[in-house]
Amino acid sequence: MNETAIFTMMARYNQRMNSQLLSVCAGLPQKQLHRDTGSLFSSILDYWNHIMFGDLVLLARMRAQNINASKLQSLDHFPTAISPQDRYYDNLEDFTIHRRKLDDTLHNWCKTLTTEDINSVLSYQSTQGDHVSQKAIDIIHHIFQHQTHHRGQLTCLLSLVGVDYGCTDLPVIVAEGSGCSF
C-alpha cells in the first residue's frame, strides 16, 4: 500500500469537505454560527476552530521533529495551538480564508512525504502534559480521523437546524481515489 497516496487522497477529501461544509455554514446567520449548541464545543464556529487546533498542533509537532518540515513553513502564519478550546477566528469569513490555506499546506505536505518521513518516530508532550512517542504514520492517520470525527459532529448540528450539507462519502467526494493499484 502506498501510504503517501492514501494521505494525499485524504488531504484532498479534507479540502473538499471543508470547502463544502464551510459554504453551507456561510449561508447561516452569524447568530446561528455562535449559538450555544449544548454539545462538546459551544458553537459551530468553535467546532471549526477545534478542527483547526488539531491540525495545527499535530503539524507543529511534525515540523518540530523535521518531518518534511520545509513544506510546513507556512505554519508561521498561523496561531500557535495551545489548547483544544482555542478560538483562533471569531468570524467565518476570516476562518475560511485561513482554513483554505491550511488545507493547501496539508495537501502539499502529504504529496511530498517519504517512506522515511512516515516511519519516523516522534516524541512530544501532549496538551495534557504526557510524554508520547509515536510513529509519524499514526499521527498522520489521526490528523484525518480527528477532522472526520468533528466534521461528523458538525453535520449533526447542521441537520438539527435543517441544513442540507450534501454527500460526505469519500468515494464520491474524491472519485479519483488514491491512484493506488490494489
Image: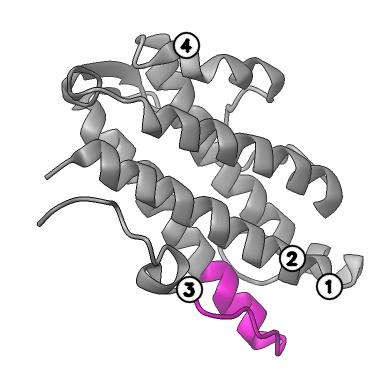
Q: CA gap, disc 4 to disc 3? A: 32 Å
The three-letter code of the residue at mark 3 reads Thr
Quadrant of res 129: top left
User: Which residue does the image show at 57% across and 14% down from the upper left?
Assistant: 73
Q: Name the residue under label 1.
A: 27
State yes or no: discs 3 and 2 in contact (Cβ < 8 Å): no
Q: CA gap, disc 3 to disc 2? A: 14 Å
The three-letter code of the residue at mark 1 reads Gly
Q: Earlier in the sequence, mark 4 or mark 1?
A: 1
Q: Earlier in the sequence, mark 4 or mark 3?
A: 4
Q: Nearer the viewer, residue 86 or 19?
A: 19
Q: Nearer the viewer, residue 163 or 125?
A: 163
Q: Give the range drawn in magenta.
A: 153-168
State yes or no: discs 4 and 2 in contact (Cβ < 8 Å): no
Residue 154 within the magenta-colored segment of the rendering: yes
Quadrant of res 113: top left
**Place of residue 44 in the rendered image (x, y in percent of width and height, measured from the top left):** 70, 63
User: Which residue does the image show at 72% across and 86% down from the upper left?
Assistant: 161
Q: Quadrant of the C terminus?
A: bottom left
Q: Name the residue under label 2.
A: 23
Q: CA gap, disc 1 to disc 2? A: 7 Å
Task: Describe the element under mark 2 as helix, strand or loop.
Answer: helix
For residue 70, the mark is 4
Q: Name the residue under label 3.
A: 168
Left or right of 67? Residue 84 is: right
**Place of residue 155 in the rendered image (x, y in percent of width and height, measured from the top left):** 57, 74
For residue 173, the mark is none
Q: Is residue 93 visible?
A: yes
Q: Can residue 91 be seen in this view?
A: no
Q: Is residue 87 above or below residue 36?
A: above
